[in-house]
Amino acid sequence: MLVDLVDLGRYPIDRPDSAAYQRLIADIRRELDADGCAVLPGFVHQGGLTQLLAEAESVAPRAHRSFNRTNAYFTRDDPRFGIGHPIRRFYDRSNAFVPADNFLPTGPLRRIYEYDGFLPFIRAALNEPEDRFFRYDDPLADVILNVVEEGQGFPWHFDTNNFTVTLAIQNAERGGAFEYAPNLRTPEHENFDKVAAILDGNFGAVRQIELQPGDLQIFRGRYSLHRVAPVSGPRPRYVGIFSFVEAEGMCGGIERTKQLYGRVLPHHLARAGRRADRLLD
Ligand SMILES: O=C(O)CCC(=O)C(=O)O
Ligand SMILES: [Fe+2]
């Protein structure tokens, strides 16, 4: 049960047959249609936040800190494309991810992700069919903590996983806003021109969200270009990230997994390239 973590009165994810659940799903779908992103304020209540913050602080020292120059696809440079092509534009990325194997099934973050009703709830909210919605099959990345410290951010990118659910645990003193361009690419179309326009600073299609601790955010990270603005101040920004995918058995690619988590497992080598689409990364 999640009653010690989630505000089940406001978000009755434990009662899928109730009218309140159906209303909630309808509200989220409307928000996703309009904005490409939905926010559930206060999804985790104060008591739950205390537990999540304690867990975040205890695992934060195990974050893999990495400094890289990366493009929006986490791929290598490809000189077959012209200068200025999005594949060839590299930005400084410095961040710290606590890999998924640091989160015990009995800890609060994984308890939410693995709660029986959580996947069906997120799937219904995203209006995805049962045979195209799975937990990320990635033992380093299914549930992670993003630790963003002074001066760090996360430059423009697309996720490998199709659907991303983030849970704000602690904000920094300043900065850390989430910026995104909803549905910028589709499984059939990379839309490099629009990606290049945003990289050039044309922010007409870009929206900004500032989450508060306890808020849950749902979006289509594989299709929506997004970034986290740099933070400042001594307090780190903590965000839990839950990933879902459309193809059973999908996990992160070798290149990206090494960059973000500092290692790969035999699992990653065995499943390299298992994707339902042909998009980059
Ligand atoms: O920290 C966040 O809000 C999202 C970070 C992100 O985009 C990612 O980890 O892929
Ligand atoms: Fe992302």
Image: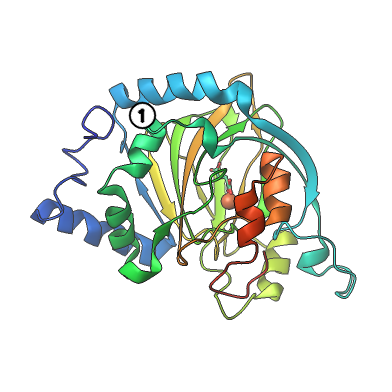
Q: Residue 250: image x %, image y %? A: 53, 61
Classed neighbour count for the residue bearing mark 1: other residues with Cα under 10 Å, few (<14), some (14–19), many (≥20): few
Q: Answer with left or right where residue 199 lies relative to residue 60.
A: right
**Residue 140 picture quarter:** top right
Q: Please identify the quadrant where the C terminus is shown.
A: bottom right
Q: Residue 165: image x %, image y %? A: 43, 49
Q: Please identify the quadrant where the N terminus is shown.
A: top left
Residue pictured at 81% horizontal, 70% vertical: 85
Q: Residue 101: image x %, image y %? A: 53, 36
Which amino acid, by three-letter code, is at mark 1?
Thr
Residue pictured at 39% horizontal, 28% vertical: 107
User: What residue would you read off at disc 1?
Assistant: 106
Residue 173 seen in the current view: no
Residue pictured at 39% horizontal, 69% vertical: 132
Q: Residue 97: image x %, image y %? A: 61, 36
Answer yes or no: disc 1 within 8 Å of ligand 1. no
Q: Which is nearer the eye, 223 or 110?
A: 110
**Residue 198 picture quarter:** bottom right
Q: Is residue 108 above or below residue 203?
A: above
Q: Residue furthest bottom?
A: 188
Q: Is residue 235 above or below residue 111?
A: above
